[in-house]
Amino acid sequence: MTQAITLRNFLTHHAAPDGLDPDLIFLIEDIASACRVIGNRLRNAAFEGNHGLAGETNVQGEDQKKLDVIADETFARICGNSRRLAALVSEEQEDAVWLKQPEAGDYLLFFDPLDGSSNIDVNLSVGSIFSVCTVAAPGERDILKPGHTQRCAGYAIYGPTMMLVLSVGDGVFGFSCEYGTGDFRLTHPGMSIPEKTAEFAINTSRHRLWDQPVRRYVEECLAGETGPRGRDFNMRWTASMVADVHRILIRGGVFLYPADEGNRAAGGKLRLLYEANPMAFLVEQAGGRATVGRTRILDVMPENHHQRVPVILGSAEEVTRLSDYHAASE
Ligand code: AHM
Ligand code: MG
């Protein structure tokens, strides 16, 4: 049996050539603790009466599950004490929560506390997604930062194994939670997305709503060996972005939640700051690409912190092909 190094050891000695700011290490450790607690609450949800709806709607007008609320409170409670954390910005909260007078170099934590929560009651994988940016100047309360300014991004996946996958800008590393000690230990160093793939992920029930470039792409994949792509494609869709992105980080693939007739007025389905940016950061760090169609997700300048965007990410060759199809249709 291998004795993989702990998250703390990795962050302290291996994560960045010049070392990481100790306060960022503390913050990432707090995020890991919050995820560990959320994972345990998920595991015991049936015994604690925590399945089902909380009876409230969130800022997006969506029904909140009890576990959405618990996960949001857990992030705030555990991460809220970090000395250099200036603000918490949650998908579940209407406004950013400022914790201190921001100083240059302080951190901003963006998070979707429980993503894919429609999967909870059917006992499939869900996750938490997070992103850390810095305050540029003393007193600055700007939370609308493009994704390329992220200092760290990652997710926890609550699946058969609880894992934490993160990047601090020097590759992508996966840590499995060891049963018994609760330690996150490095089991997936240097995660990378193969450039080529024959697997795509999209909610095909929205086929009638798609724009021409997405329709063309999927139809060509479905045509298989005798079609223009000359090979058979597989399709997977879990309705849990964390699970779909995790699969792509492990074995490649392309994930699409495009703008379509049904969601165009809202800008798309997935949130830029809590879902698209952190996942795009990870995907690029793993050698893949992430766009809203043609534009790189990490270059989108946010206009509000609950903004939604189209998302196309994964294996570089397929994302480039989709970008070309979008360009050709303009
Ligand atoms: P949520 O934040 O309300 O859970 O919504 C985000 C989820 C993603 O995890 C997933 O990719 C997508 O919504 C699934 O959408 P659909 O139900 O349309 O397939
Ligand atoms: Mg979500």
Image (cartoon, helix red, strand yellow):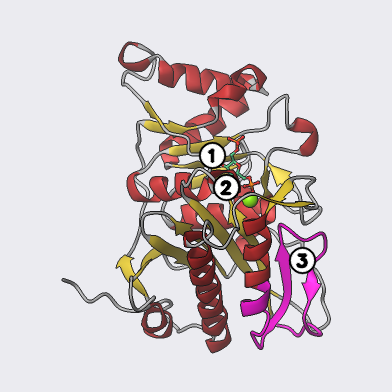
- Mark 1 beta carbon near ligand 1 (under 8 Å): yes
Residue located 33% across and 70% down the image: 179
For residue 40, say whether it is visible. yes
Say if the magenta span includes residue 102. Answer: yes
Say which quarter of the image contains residue 253.
Answer: top left
Q: Where in the figure is residue 263, as x and y percent of width and height?
A: 73, 32
Judge whether 248 appears above or below 156 on screen: above
Pointer 1: what residue? 239
Asked which secondary structure carries label 1, the reply is loop
Viewer-proximal residue among 5 and 72 = 72
Which residue bears the numbered disc 3? Answer: 143
Residue 241 lies, in percent from the top left, at 53, 46
Indicate yes or no: mark 2 CB to ligand 1 under 8 Å.
yes
The kind of residue on which mark 2 rests is Gly
Distance of mark 2 from mark 1, alpha carbons? 6 Å
Cβ atoms under marks 1 and 3 closer than 8 Å: no
Hey, what amino acid is under mark 1?
Ala
Q: Which residues are drawn in magenta?
A: 76-104
User: Which residue is the site of mark 2?
Assistant: 116
**Marks 3/2: CA–CA distance:** 24 Å
